[in-house]
Amino acid sequence: MPSVTYISASGSETAVAGFAGDSVMETAVRNGIPGIVAECGGSLSCATCHVFVCADSVFSPMEDLEDAMLDGTAIDREENSRLSCQLRLSDADIRVTTPETQV
Amino acid sequence: MTGTGTSAGTLIIGNCQAGVQLACSLRELGDTDPIVLVGEEPHAPYQRPPLSKAFLKGEVTADSLTFRTHEFYRERNIELVTRERIVSVTRDGDGSGGTAVAESGRRFEFARLALTTGAVPRQIPFDGSELEGVSYLRTATDAAQLQQGLAAARNVVVVGGGFIGLEVAAGARAAGLTVTVLEAAPRLVGRAVSEQTSEFYLQAHRRRGIRVVLNAQVARFLGEHDRVTGVELGDGTVVPADVVLIGVGVIPRTELAEQLGLALDNGIVVDGTALCSDGLTVAAGDCANLPNPSITPGGVARLRLESVQNAVEQAKIAAATLLSLPAAYSTVPWFWSDQADLKLQIAGLSGGHDQIVLRGEPDSETFSVLYYRAGQLIAADCINKPLDFIAARGALHHGQNVPADLAGDVTIPLKKLVSAVPALAGK
């Protein structure tokens, strides 16, 4: 089982066990990680599951809709911005930082 | 607050989006008293929106829709009780607490009470409603049955051209089934969107091969060997059907609130702090009738909102209220509906609009409808236009505007038009 570490905007880290195939968003919500809202449940409708992916963590490239939605996040996007509902876990451990706010 | 066996903390009735959020928010706000979250469904609380979308396509399972792990509830000392339907609730004479009793006889004592009882599908008593293959869609159990029915079906009839019905219709059509939508009103989704958006959906679904009948009168369901075979209309024509889905809205569940003598009016009447008329009980989500939370003035005074955003927001407010902390509605109501490849996102409440601006060409299936009242943007229906949605929701959240005379120019991103204009005075 991959370990997923969520780093809050203030720097505190929470690591939880994930399952390959689940999304980084689902894993966060199920474990009650603050900092990821995900109102739409992963249907690419709300842009409230924005994360910054740490350099050592690798995911498949983003599609156009995710790219477009990232232009509308509450905290402006950066190079390593992704919507965590689109990030599928493999067996590799993952680290992401959550923004200060999602709405 | 302590006791042997049953402990009296907060009892939340309704294992749903609002109920889970309320429990989580109580803990986040520092409440250390017992919390019991009770509901009649066999599952741990789960997301409902995908039931009419990804779930029917087999893209997600019931397990994957679960909100929180059992460990989550355990670690936060939230007692999750499933398969218990609360049938009666009484308060002690002095109002300090009370007792709820389940159908099984199990008793739940409480010091504080929250109602997140949700809603049930509106039933229509047509002849033949009891036939196998005639279904409603609200729970994961309903969805699993519908999915099974669709897998073996060729002809599908959807009664009701609202969001649930059109989502199921679009999915079934995309899967290659013959689909007929019967809508009693002169247009689709009449409760939620403007005539322009309704007309777009009519054309878009017809383009995809769905037969849509407006002003349709259902006379009865026909069957053989207890299984549905068709739907007879008022004029005597029969539409063949292996599966019938009835999606004609929901009715808020208010039986328990009624027992408590709470004020009811299309739901449980609450104030802006989610407090019911007894000044003690809180209610949140689909079951609650609340003051219009729009930041912009005007529109209806009170309403019931059936959405994830509202369930979450109201639950947070209700949790604060139970702990005597201040809270106010601070998010923009929003809704979404995925109908096959058509992604609708609605920001704000369009009731009471006096002007509409079309942004883009409906036939392109990529456009937005912006609603104004007295020159102020109050809502937007965005079809395959996620950026318009994000921009509109942001503008509404910050009390900003998009000038109506510029809003139709698709060559300028909506976000730019918002940021160019300062907030209107007098919000």
Image (spheres, coloured by chain):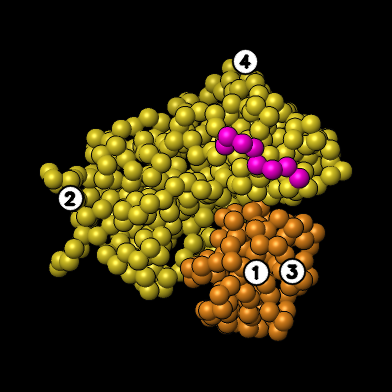
Chain colours: A orange, B yellow
CA distance separating discs 2 and 4: 58 Å
The residue drawn where x is 66% and y is 62% is A75
Looking at the rendered image, the disc whose residue lies closer to the viewer, 2 or 4, is 2
State the residue position of label 3: A78
Q: Which mark is residue B235?
A: 4
Q: Chain of mark 2?
A: B
What amino acid is at disc 2? Ser
What amino acid is at disc 1? Val
State the residue position of label 1: A51
Q: Are marks 3 and 4 on the same chain?
A: no
Q: Which mark is residue B96?
A: 2
Q: Main secondary structure of the magenta part?
A: loop
Instruction: Give residue B116's position: percent from left, percent from top.
Output: 38, 48
Q: Secondary structure at mark 3?
A: loop
Number of disc labels: 4
Image quarter where the N terminus of chain B lies is bottom left
